[in-house]
Amino acid sequence: MEWKEIIDEFLTDIEIRGYSKVTVKNYKFKLDNIRTYFLSNNIEHIDNIKKQDVKKWVGYLQKSGKQASTINVYVNMLNQIFEYMLDEEYVQHNPTKRIVKLKQQHKIIYPLNDDEIKQLLQQAKLNKHKHIAQRNVVIFTMLLECGLRIQEIENLKPDDILENQIVIRNSKYNKDRAVAITPLLRKEMTKYDRIKKAKYKYSEFEYYFVSYRLTKLEGRAIWHIMRTIQKQVNIREVVRFSAHTLRHTYAYMQVRNGMDIYTLSLNMGHSQVSSTQKYLQTLKSDDFVKESIKYSTLKNLR
């Protein structure tokens, strides 16, 4: 079977089964990468893949520097394609069936500390264009106050903004949810709304965050903005800065401020509380270190 043909059919199937647009887009991106590899190795039809081909591919991904968790995701996606083909009786065996998952190393994730958060927000305000500066401040504030994903930020529409909450539609797991608009976030959003309307002499926008062309501010553009601002401030080397780091920072701050894990799980859009617990297990912070030092065994000998 042709690669493109079966990938398109599979994507249609998961869309019918209720997968969100974000998830389908993610599947397509990764499956296209898989197809590119096998086509470059002269495997032009997906049903010609053998177990040994899958092993060589895994080896290639390892040599390319991919983490074990990433490789496992890719192999799982190829497995899902073959399981679909088995169900449709297109093939009689799945070459990924006995491929053992790679052992994953759970790296410690350090959230931003209070000073780093203040630096980012201050730097975001320094853009010479008022409307861009305020837009960037609101993006950072929304990420840190609500724990949103970049895809959720880029897809926000004015109708999703209510008096005291933001409705996140068709997100991961295809679930809608609402997050609170805190007083600080409301203040920055009000400024952004006023400056945006004054700048563009326009009262209606399709998307809440817009580019200079008045089109949706794409996720990659949001990430570029964040990286540009991050490079202009002092962030500890131990912090691996990413959009997900801000999401981890949100989670850590909520727990530090006393939020219960069930409420946090709902706010973050996790399908289960156990997902939130796993999420928090890899977090470490300066507060954790200071608290641990207080309980030094030898210092507290009596």
Image (cartoon, rainbow, N blue to C red):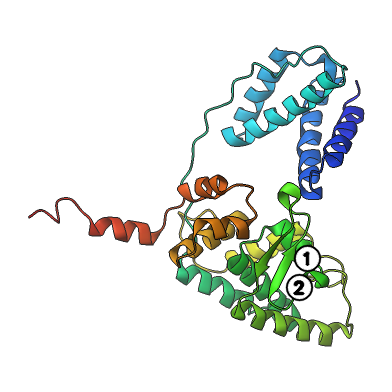
Q: Which residue is painted at 65% across and 29% down in the image? A: 61
**Count of number-bearing discs:** 2
Q: Position of residue 261 (x, y in %)?
A: 51, 56
Residue 40 in the image: above or below residue 252: above
Work out whether residue 221 or residue 198 is closer to the camera in this orientation and state it: 198
Image point (52%, 70%), residue name: 117
Mark 2, other Cα within 10 Å: few <14 / some 14–19 / many ≥20: some
User: Which quarter of the figure is the N terminus placed in?
Assistant: top right
* CA neighbours of label 1 inside 10 A, class few (<14), some (14 to 19), many (20+): many
Residue 77 lies left or right of residue 266; in this view the side is right
Image vertical order of residue 179 relative to residue 292, above or below:
below
Q: CA distance from mark 1 to mark 2?
A: 8 Å
Q: Quadrant of residue 54?
A: top right
Q: Position of residue 14 (x, y in %)?
A: 82, 37
Type of the residue with mark 1: Leu
Label 2 element class: loop
> Which one is earlier in the sequence, the residue at label 1 or at label 2?
1
Residue 292 showing in the rendered view: yes
**In the image, residue 55 above or below residue 147:** above
Residue under the image location 46 percent in, 52 percent down: 283
Which disc number belongs to residue 171? none
Closest to the camera, between mark 1 and mark 2, is 2
SS class, disc 1: loop
Q: Quadrant of the C terminus?
A: bottom left
- Tell me the residue at 77%/23% (across/down): 83
Horizontal and vertical percent for residue 249? 52, 61
Residue under pointer 1: 156
Disc 2 target residue: 161
Q: Amino acid at mark 2?
A: Ile
Q: Looking at the image, do the residues carrying marks 1 and 2 touch, with CB atoms under 8 Å apart?
A: yes
Left/right of residue 98 with respect to residue 218 in the rendered view:
left
The residue lying toward the viewer, choosing from 115 and 234, is 115
